[in-house]
Image: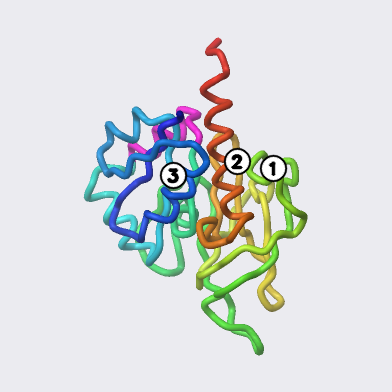
Amino acid sequence: MPIIAVIDYDMGNLHSACKGLQEAGAQTVVSDRPEDLVSADAVVLPGVGAFDPAMQHLRSRHLIPVIQDILASGKPFLGICLGLQILFEGSEEGTEAGLGIIPGTVKRFQSEPGITIPHMGWNQLEYQQPDLPLWRHSPAQPWVYFVHSYYVDPVDPTVKAATVTHGTQTITAAIARDNLMAVQFHPEKSSTFGLQILANFVEQVQATLATPVA
């Protein structure tokens, strides 16, 4: 049974994500202790709220270099919602520097007639990396649940794993690069497909553990 650390930094309810991971066969450890994150088989960075407080909470717990080192180590890593946004260099929402793992910034939706901000509710994904293991056993253009006013804008378009259109704006809904995967929507609120994503992540972690070290 893989051990997945879920980072606790006072930015949202972690129960639903943990439940989905547990149902997929993982043991979850909710923690802000660096040693727990380092010893786990994989790490999940969830989050709900604003960019600056998130970075301040991570800094106060001395977790920024820990997360950066974990990502560099090749360990499977999944970011969710705000946990996607803080992987970037900065945000129009605030003034704090982000983790800087992915070059690019977080931008606010532009106002236009007929759309609401925040982007809230169900919307359909368009896969940009259709063979990504995170999408296994999933339908084309699945419906997922969003709640956000800001979106990520990566410098490198090849990291985009999925997009979504809100009004006339098509924005990045998920990214993937090597061991890093992150989604803007909430898998834990996205019904069967969302739970499948969490199960796929657990499956990836299990595959990593089964791969012999060269």
Mark found first going from the N terminus, 2 or 3: 3
Q: Which residue is disc 3 drawn over?
A: 44
Q: Quadrant of the C terminus?
A: top right
- Which secondary structure lies at badge 1? loop
Label 1 sits on what residue type? Answer: Arg
Disc number placed over residue 200 in the picture, else none = 2
Question: Does 12 appear above or below 20?
Answer: below
Disc number placed over residue 136 in the picture, else none = 1
Q: Are marks 1 and 2 in contact (CB under 8 Å)?
A: yes
Q: Main secondary structure of the magenta part?
A: helix
Q: How is the image coloured?
A: rainbow
What distance separates the C-alpha of mark 1 from that of mark 2?
7 Å
Q: Are marks 3 and 1 in contact (CB under 8 Å)?
A: no
Q: Position of residue 157 (x, y in %)?
A: 68, 51
> Around disc 3, counting alpha carbons within 10 Å, would you say few (fewer than 14), some (14 to 19), or many (20 or more)?
many
Q: Quadrant of the N terminus?
A: top left
Q: Are marks 2 and 3 in contact (CB under 8 Å)?
A: no
Q: How many marks?
A: 3
**Range covered by the magenta-colored residues:** 65-76
- Front residue of this view, candidates 101 and 192: 192
In this view, the residue farthest toward the right is 140
Q: Which one is in front in this view, the residue at disc 3 or the one at disc 1?
A: 1
- In the image, is 64 to the left or to the right of 211? left
Q: Which one is in front in this view, the residue at disc 2 or the one at disc 3?
A: 2
The quarter of the displayed image where residue 13 is located: bottom left
Label 2 sits on what residue type? Answer: Asn
Q: Position of residue 68 (x, y in %)?
A: 40, 38
The quarter of the displayed image where residue 203 is located: top right
